[in-house]
Image: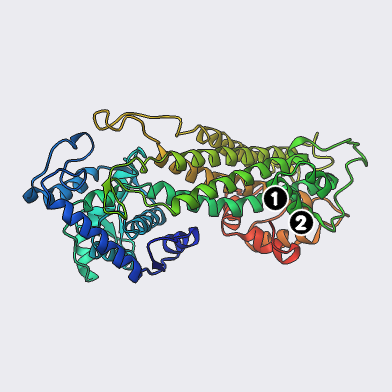
């Protein structure tokens, strides 16, 4: 992965965060770093105070710092700001935020020396991951505490996880890999801390996970429609063309592709006449489609933030070093919350379909709770309880973090974004949505297998076969259910639904 002065993509972030891609600095980036550093050095030599170069920070910015104390100032800002608490943040999140900070450093707008950027790349390449904690960021001057813990590792201080997964003193890990700790100079400590990199990294990863989940949810919705003997006529392209939301059309097209060739659809007026299917079945493309369009908006925001150089102050091409407010996380925080709302609604409609499959009064001929011997067996009754509990949690997670603000830094930072908190709850929501989709998949595949005499669609058959091959058992007497649900969750999480269905349907939208 070659890092230049611009052009980092979401795929680049995923490659570094999840696949341990190696990093190199381009010649262009090294030149930009050196040029910006010359500007900072020139300003540092002048008697006039310049924020971040020769002053304190935040509410302490009014103090002019003498040259002999500036190195200590940079060390101190890192040490004092590395004040996180709580559980450790996931390795992929830390790698993403480190890589994104390196991306901004290499833009040439931060005034950091080339050797500092190279050390950041060396630490990532060595598989050394700073210990970052859950709590500490308000998303105001960016993700200060999380980034400070990363900068602490750069200095050879604090704790970090080695490539073997063991947490040890960072200085020991750097020495083992031949990495010399950085001695920070003017502005460098501040430049390493002042960005939206944590919340942006989590946004990029959530977008990738949700894109796959929305496709998987289209498949499980189609399977539930099939199991309920519903009609696929509501998925006709001409119906969605007259309400031209792109996500809705894509979702309907996916469901229609999955149901092609099914003998189960269209029986909604046989033994138990229905004029139309329930909303959770009939409106699946409208709900999932609205979520898809939300993903598209969030992706646009992420792309803009990936193209940004977030720091304060910044070095401009004309040689000025100017304070600004670009570090504020509002643009990212809003879409993180928006995605949590969309994910909660997708989980909610999936749970309603599952409940319908289990209710003998609404399932059109399926046994109560899909049980083998109802009364003796409880079937999937409590699987739906678990799904309902997850949906309820999703609704709580959908309460926006970005609508909150709490003043800090003696009222200097008096309006904050809470973007880090929005990102953390979205990660939980994505995990819960995966489980919800897995439970619908589990129920729908069992229900379809209980429909004797009518063949499911070829795509459905492929999904059922893949689920069973993954260790998720089919209909039968009651058994220990948690392992089945765990296997279904692992199947969805690994992309098994799409791997099974797309050879039959072609790539889903």
Occupied quadrant, residue 284: top right
Q: How many marks?
A: 2
**Is residue 476 at least partly visible in the picture?**
no
* Residue 506, percent from left and from top: 73, 64
* Residue 8, percent from left and from top: 44, 60
* Residue 81, percent from left and from top: 23, 43
Occupied quadrant, residue 363: top right
For the residues labelled 1 and 2, say whether their Cβ atoms are less than 8 Å apart. Answer: yes
In the picture as drawn, the residue positioned furthest to the left comes out as 68
How crowded pointer 2 is (Cα within 10 Å; few <14, some 14-19, many 20+) is rated as many
* Residue identifier under label 2: 258
**Is residue 26 at least partly visible in the picture?**
yes
Q: Secondary structure at mark 1?
A: helix
In the rendered structure, which disc, 1 or 2, sits on the residue that comes first in sequence? 1
Q: In the picture, which quadrant includes the N terminus?
A: bottom left
Q: Is residue 304 left or right of residue 247?
A: left
How crowded pointer 1 is (Cα within 10 Å; few <14, some 14-19, many 20+) is rated as many
Q: Secondary structure at mark 2?
A: helix
Q: Is residue 275 left or right of residue 9?
A: right
Q: Residue at x 37, y 49 (%)?
A: 89
Q: Is residue 178 left or right of residue 459?
A: left
Q: Is residue 273 left or right of residue 472?
A: right
* Residue 356, percent from left and from top: 74, 38
Q: Specify the label residue 218 is tagged with.
A: 1
As displayed, is residue 203 above or below residue 391?
below
Please tell me which residue lies in front, 301 or 271: 301
Q: CA distance from mark 1 to mark 2?
A: 9 Å
Q: Residue at x 16, y 35 (%)?
A: 62
As displayed, is residue 237 above or below residue 496?
above
Q: In the picture, which quadrant includes the C terminus?
A: bottom right
Please tell me which residue lies in front, 329 or 26: 26
């Amino acid at each position: 992965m070659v890092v230049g002065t611009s052009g980092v993509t979401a795929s680049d972030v995923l490659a570094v965060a999840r696949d341990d891609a190696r990093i190199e600095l381009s010649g262009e980036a090294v030149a930009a770093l050196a040029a910006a550093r010359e500007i900072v050095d020139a300003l540092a030599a002048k008697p006039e105070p310049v924020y971040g170069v020769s002053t304190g920070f935040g509410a302490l910015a009014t103090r002019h710092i003498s040259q002999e104390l500036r190195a200590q100032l940079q060390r101190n800002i890192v040490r004092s700001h590395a004040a996180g608490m709580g559980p450790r943040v996931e390795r992929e999140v830390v790698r993403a935020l480190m890589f994104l900070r390196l991306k901004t450093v290499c833009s040439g707008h931060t005034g950091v020396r080339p050797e500092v950027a190279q050390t950041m790349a060396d630490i990532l390449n060595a598989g050394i991951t700073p210990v970052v904690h859950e709590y500490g960021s308000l998303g105001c001057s960016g993700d200060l505490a999380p980034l400070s813990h990363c900068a602490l590792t750069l200095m050879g201080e604090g704790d970090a996880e080695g490539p073997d997964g063991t947490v040890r003193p960072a200085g020991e890990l750097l020495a083992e890999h031949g990495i010399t700790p950085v001695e920070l100079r003017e502005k460098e400590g501040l430049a390493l801390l002042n960005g939206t990199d944590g919340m942006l990294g989590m946004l990029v990863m959530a977008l990738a996970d949700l894109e796959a989940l929305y496709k998987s949810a289209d498949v499980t919705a189609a399977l539930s429609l099939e199991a309920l003997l519903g009609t696929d006529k509501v998925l006709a392209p001409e119906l969605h063309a007259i309400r031209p939301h792109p996500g809705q059309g894509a979702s309907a097209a996916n469901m229609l592709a999955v149901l092609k060739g099914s003998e189960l659809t269209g029986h909604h007026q046989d033994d138990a006449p229905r004029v139309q299917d329930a909303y959770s079945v009939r409106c699946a493309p409208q709900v999932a489609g609205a979520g898809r369009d939300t993903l598209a908006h969030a992706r646009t925001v992420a792309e803009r933030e990936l193209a940004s150089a977030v720091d304060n102050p910044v070095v401009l091409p004309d040689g000025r070093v100017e304070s600004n407010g670009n570090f504020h996380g509002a643009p990212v925080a809003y879409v993180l919350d928006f995605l949590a709302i969309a994910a909660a609604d997708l989980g909610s409609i999936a749970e309603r379909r599952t409940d319908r499959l289990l209710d003998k009064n609404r399932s059109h001929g399926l046994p109560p709770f899909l049980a083998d011997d109802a009364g003796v067996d409880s079937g999937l009754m409590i699987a739906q309880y678990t799904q309902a509990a997850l949906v309820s949690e999703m609704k709580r997670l959908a309460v926006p973090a970005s609508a909150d603000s709490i003043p800090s830094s003696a009222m200097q930072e008096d309006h904050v974004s809470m973007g880090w908190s929005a990102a953390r709850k979205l990660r939980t929501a994505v995990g819960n949505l995966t489980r919800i989709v897995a439970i619908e998949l589990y129920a729908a595949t069992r229900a379809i297998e209980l429909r004797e005499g009518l063949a499911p669609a070829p795509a459905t058959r492929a999904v059922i076969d893949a689920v069973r091959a993954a260790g998720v058992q089919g209909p039968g007497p009651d058994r220990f259910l948690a392992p089945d649900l765990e296997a279904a969750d692992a199947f969805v999480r690994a992309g098994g639904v799409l791997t099974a269905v797309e050879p039959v349907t072609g790539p889903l939208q």
